[in-house]
Image (cartoon, rainbow, N blue to C red):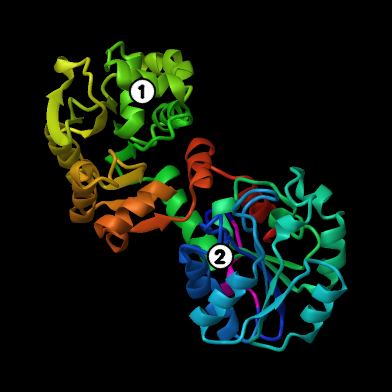
Amino acid sequence: MIEELGIKTLDDVELENQVVLVRVDFNSPVDPQTKKILDNTRIRIHAEKTIRELVSKKAKTVIMAHQGRLGDPDFTSLKQHAEILSKILGIDVKFVDDIFGEKAISAIKRLQPGEVLVLENVRSWKNETKKASAEEHSKTEMVKNLSPYIDIFCIDAFAAAHRPHVSLIGFAPVVKHVVAGRVMEAEIRALYKVRNNPEKPCIYILGGAKAEDAAEVVENILSQKIADFVLTGGLIANLFLYSKGIDLGEPNNKILEKKGFTQFVDKIKELLGKYPENIILPTDLAVEVNGSKANISINQLPTQYLIKDIGTESIKEFSNMIMKSKTVVMSGPMGVFEQKLFDEGTKKIFEAMASSKAFTLIGGGHTIAAAHKLGFLDKMSHVSTGGGALIDYLIKGTLPVIEVLKQYSK
């Protein structure tokens, strides 16, 4: 039980011989030409944390998941996901190319304790992505067809928890037991800790190239006194510097304009005026000059060169602040970490987080990729599987799927 929210977990139900429908997030990077999965991290996380336990406790496990969006290059069958899952678990995982028709129902009926069945890509059904309440979704064809054969609905897909889709919430009103899987449980506990009850001092680090939610995140965590400081890097730092009235130079200004980020300038300017001591911007930056790295201070802007990382003084300042903190949340790298020349900012921030005594949480695809590449993935207190779900939770303090768990997991 997640006591703070009254949400049941796998500890609160008898699993042996029960049919457990597990909604996981197996959505993985796919080669658009061959349709082969390029990285099985998400499959492995669900396998090791939730599915293996269900197998060992003799549940009859039915896996429901999505891969891509209908019509997109990464949309594909879940047959190879089932094959990958077989290898990870070391058992013969069954697959059926059906979601809720006769083939799927027959396969569920034939399941024996300790066996696992993967249903076809739930997004093959065009109504899956409609947004509605759990009650409305419970009246859909999919839920009506499958729910009579399900004893426990286990929601484990945190990375999709910001989407009120049928397979994520529709079974909750009609299945007897509704629980959070181990991935969802770990995410909720960690995020509740950093957003609802963080140990102070608390620092949030916002970086990366997705700056569209930055202002909203900053406003929420500072106005509610969740974080003491927000450190900025990447394009988010550029946008905040630009909003402060600093001319970054034509190539850098153009990137912000091209991505449509200049629409947030007024809001960010207001935040900078309201929280001048709490929003920490870089004091220097790293730029690329003819294939080499050069450090420039903010006073040397504008520059004709592309900004690709935070500078050495900013790295020192940010690292010192992290070392004095008790909670650190990071979403987005400090620079273009993919290029060896410009991975220092991100690397040094990870180093400070790993060396500190703080509870450290990182999330988002690029942040996780950076931590993996630079060797810090296993040195953080919690690595969130969510990108959009993580940002939504940081802004709102909840997600549609968490609300459904709170309502029906009683």
Amino acid type indicated by mark 2? Met
Classify mark 1: helix, strand or loop. helix
- Horizontal placement of 365 versus 62: left or right? left
Q: Which residue is mark 2?
A: 1
Viewer can see residue 380: no
Residue 4: x percent and y percent? 52, 54
Residue 396: x percent and y percent? 54, 37
- Horizontal placement of 285 versus 2: left or right? left
Pick the front one: 401 or 345: 345
Q: Alpha carbon of mark 1 to alpha carbon of mark 2: how far?
A: 42 Å
Q: Which residue is mark 1?
A: 239
Residue 79 location, quadrant: bottom right
Span highlighted in magenta in the image: 6-13
Classify mark 2: helix, strand or loop. loop
Q: Is residue 12 magenta?
A: yes
Amino acid type indicated by mark 1? Leu
The C terminus is located in which quarter?
bottom right
- State which tag comes first along the sequence, 1 or 2: 2
Q: Is residue 112 above or below residue 241?
A: below
